[in-house]
Image: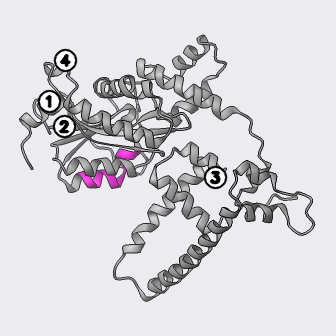
Amino acid sequence: MTKQRKRYSAEFKAKAALEVVKAQRSLNELASEYEMHPNQLMQWKRQLLESLPLLFADRRSQGEKEQVAKEAELYQQIGQLKVELDWMKKKLACSVAERRGLIEPGHTQLSVVRQCELLGIARSGYYYQPIGEQAENQQLMRLIDAEYTRHPFYGYRKITHWLRDAGHLVNKKRVQRLMQTMGLAAIVPKPNLSKPHPAHPVYPYLLRGVKIERVNQVWHPEGTRDITYIALQQGWMYLVAIIDWFSRYVLAWEISNTLDTDFCLVVLERALKRAAPTIFNTDQGAQFTSTAFTSRLQQAKIAISMDGRGRALDNIFVERLWRTVKYEEVYPNDYPSLIVGRQRLDAYFPFYNTQRYHQALAYRTPAAVYFEDCSPL
């Protein structure tokens, strides 16, 4: 007997994808609510973002216009169904667990599948028996994040031994997988430190021997592999920021519940509204070697610098911000959700830029150094 593949309605996919795009909750929380694997939600998010430009496309052929009209009619019907479904759910204003309890497996006229549809729950969730490993992995990721922040030159082997010494029974493969999910890699000079996407171009490293002596000379996306992991009480989020190397001024930042290119582009656009650097230096991660990202830099006539070799010294510099952010803001507050994390960071970065003194800047603030030497576009 073959197992039937689960099918989701277009309305369900659109609603779930929009929740991911809004980035108000972690991917882990959304996956738990919708009772599916996080990768499925990420795939729907990509499909949604890829289809959005079609809504604004001009000079479409007659066939395309007819297709759009048909889709509009279908979406209208979906909207009406959503209204009716939301109304029905109000009549069943109880928790998911309580709704699961309403299912009657032996019903003579309604199958379990149809009962799940009427109650607004996933059939897989009805049959699923939690095994409790997710909470354990999340705790391990918190420990890994803290130890890696203290010693960013630790790879998965040393992290594994550290966890074992702390009493956790883990193997190297598990730690390696969790670190890959978190976007962590040891900061040491070695071949192929950061591999780009095979289809993305690699640009030469432009900073070897260059003295950084003015603002907007070099910008850099900040963090481990230029994106840093932040644990939440339920799930996690990713944080990226663009920093001016000379002044340490944070020009822009953003968080996301998925590790993709879109939120990196959002940060770049915000930073470019303020100024434009001579050189934008980054690693060879797929987010920053993507055509969308590098094309935007080329459009602004910014020189692109990236090189896996020599990144160890660069990362020693750029990791300082994340250590400061995590020890002063993230760890003490233990964000319960992505929304709270955004609110807290929205208050912290102005403090970092305008009030926090830096010994390397002769006990001045990044804003004082940046705006003293900053010339308008």
Amino acid of disc 2: Val
Number of other residues with Cα within 10 Å of mark 1, as a class: few under 14, some 14 to 19, many 20 or more: few
Mark 2 and mark 1 in contact (Cβ < 8 Å)?
yes
Q: Residue at x 55, y 38 (%)?
A: 235
Residue type at mark 3: give it.
Answer: Tyr
Circle 2 residue: 218
Q: Quadrant of residue 326?
A: top left
Q: SS class of the residue under badge 1?
A: loop
Residue bearing the label numbered 4? 359
Q: In terms of depth relative to the viewer, which is nearer, 255 or 225?
A: 255
Of the two numbered discs 3 and 1 in the rendering, the one whose residue sits closer to the viewer: 3
The first of marks 3 and 4 along the sequence is 3
Pick the quarter of the image with the N terminus: bottom right
Q: Which residue is mark 1?
A: 212
Residue at mark 3 to residue at mark 1: CA–CA distance: 49 Å
Tell me the amino acid under the disc marked 4.
Answer: Gln
Tell me if residue 209 is in the magenta stretch: no
Sequence order check, earlier mark of 3 and 1: 3
What is the x, y in percent for residue 66? 48, 86
